Image (tube, coloured by chain):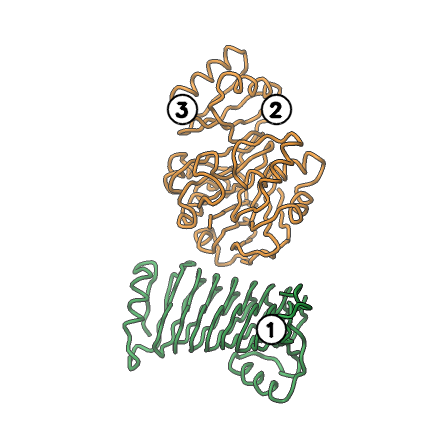
Chain colours: A orange, B green
Amino acid sequence: MCGIVGLFLKDRSLEPRLGSLLADMLVKMSDRGPDSAGIAIYGEGKEGRSKITIQSSRPETDFPDLSKSLEQAGINVSMEIKDTHAVFSLPVAEEERFHTLLRADFAAMRVMSRGQHIEIYKEVGQPRDVAARFDLSGMGGTHGIGHTRMATESAVTTMGAHPFSTGADQCLVHNGSLSNHNSLRRKLRHQGMPFETDNDTEVAASYLSYRMMEGASLGEALESSLSDLDGFYTFVVGTRDGFGVLRDPIACKPAVMAETDRYVAFGSEYRALVNLPDIEMARVWEPEPATVYFWKH
Amino acid sequence: MQQFDLEAEGLRKLNQTLHALGNDTNQKTWEVINPRGSHAIAVGLDVPIEVTVRGSTGYYCGGMNKQATIIVDGSAGPGVAENMMSGKVIIEGDASQYAGATGRGGLLVIKGNAASRCGISMKGINIVVHGNIGHMSAFMAQKGNLVVLGDAGEALGDSLYEAQIFVRGSVKSLGADCIEKEMRPEHIEVLKTLLEDAGADAKPEEFRRYGSARNLYHFDIDHADSY
């Protein structure tokens, strides 16, 4: 099963409510995926600075230790802790040093996302609890995607939760299962793409990142995934300023979209959308199979 | 008219209440408010009543229906009227995947569009779609009629048995063993009745008929690629 939600705001006055609207959508999809939940949220970025979201299983000691090491190394960072995650903000030029230090001294901590705008929060547990732990309702932003997971292809772990981010300001959530993920992972590894899990969705995210590194646009990368990914999938992807949807050609995974002058929304089911502003007036439709949908700010 | 607030009273109470009605009930008309995309609304009814759902529904609305008329004043999620036995289900908006799947009788009317696999494995149900239908519709359909006023998606009627398909618009492609067939007077008659019952503004003569070529009924090595 799995549940996917996404919300792309056109009306800036809704931005402070992004987190609370997304949280409601996510919780509504709980019985599609009670194993774990996660969200990627795109907010204001600061020019010249990167945001890196880190997860730790020992947040009370790890994050202060990391912060101290960064200070000692002379890296100008600010840190905001939310439960097991912390968002570090630092100058773009320092990003490489940050990752080197992380790999050397804090290998147990996991990078959830990096980029100018994106933050990813994900954990094992009921969507309602996950949303509360990270105070999702209190977050604002321009667009975001979320996922409630019913694990099929890999273990129920924090790293196996969605969204998966394999490139700066990129992320992907998936409902379905891929049948050729092992062979594709091998090929992508040969091309130098790193993998952290045995999860099929990480392969899809990495595949899109790799295609875009080769010069494809997101639209072209999604288009080519129709021929290179086998299995069932509905993908919702986020980029720095965009939001995309793709269903496989067989399209057995459910998907509903709604659009008004104020937002574009995606849900695995209509009930995920019922509390959005003026949903009764929205154009509601089911995305066509093998068709790329994309919105951009 | 009886009104039932689904949000206030819950799904189990709705279905229990409707199941408890007898054939001679005086409570003939019902309105369900606040469906908000909930699943399994008004399933398993076996009583001649009319239930109007004000808003859109989730999975399996009107499933296994017998006798009742169920009207969705909104759009319907996956599997609407699945395995209907008799009665009528009317969707004012669109229907999601596999509408009317495996239905054995009754009439399903979709006033908007239907998504993929509409009427998959239908076994006697009649389905009239005012708009378009998606891919793999009437896959393995065995009996009954699927009428489409708009266009049909890919692989229409794949591995079809004896169900009949009538399409007024274009057909993107026909599935394995599905062919266009001659429209004879008896088909015009069937279609005329169905269009009237479904309140559809169309003439039977505007439709083309599709059915099984019956080449896949018995295994034949020459057709191995089609199975």
Camera-side residue: A5 or B140?
A: B140
Disc 1 marks which residue?
B218
Give me the C-alpha separation between circle 3 and circle 2: 27 Å
Q: Identify which residue is drawn at 38% across, 39% down.
A: A125
Secondary structure state at the residue bearing disc 2: loop
> Where A20 sits versus B163, above or below?
above
Reading the image, the residue beneath label 2 is: A48
- Residue B136: x and y in percent read 59, 64
Placement of the C terminus of chain A among the 4 image quadrants: top right
Circles 1 and 2, Cβ within 8 Å, touching? The answer is no
In the picture, residue B177 is in which quadrant? bottom right
Residue placed at 48% from the left, 77% from the top? Answer: B107
B93 is higher (above) or lower (below) than A141: below
Disc 1 crowd, CA 10 A, few/some/many (<14, 14-19, 20+)? few
Locate residue A105, reporting x and y percent.
49, 16
State how many labels appear.
3
Residue most toward the bottom?
B185
Q: Secondary structure at mark 1?
A: loop
**Residue sticking out furthest to the right:** A215
Question: Disc 1 sits on a residue from what chain?
Answer: B
Mark 3 vs mark 2, foreground winner is 3
Q: What kind of residue is marked 2? A: Gly
Q: Nearer the viewer, residue B200 or A18?
A: B200
- Compared across the picture, whether B11 is left or right of A33 comes to left
Where residue B99 sits: x, y (%)? 50, 67
Q: Are tags 3 and 2 found on a single chain?
A: yes
Q: Identify the mark nearer the N-term, 3 or 2.
A: 2
Residue type beneath disc 3? Pro
Whether tag 1 and tag 3 are in contact, CB under 8 A, the answer is no
For disc 3, the marked residue is A59
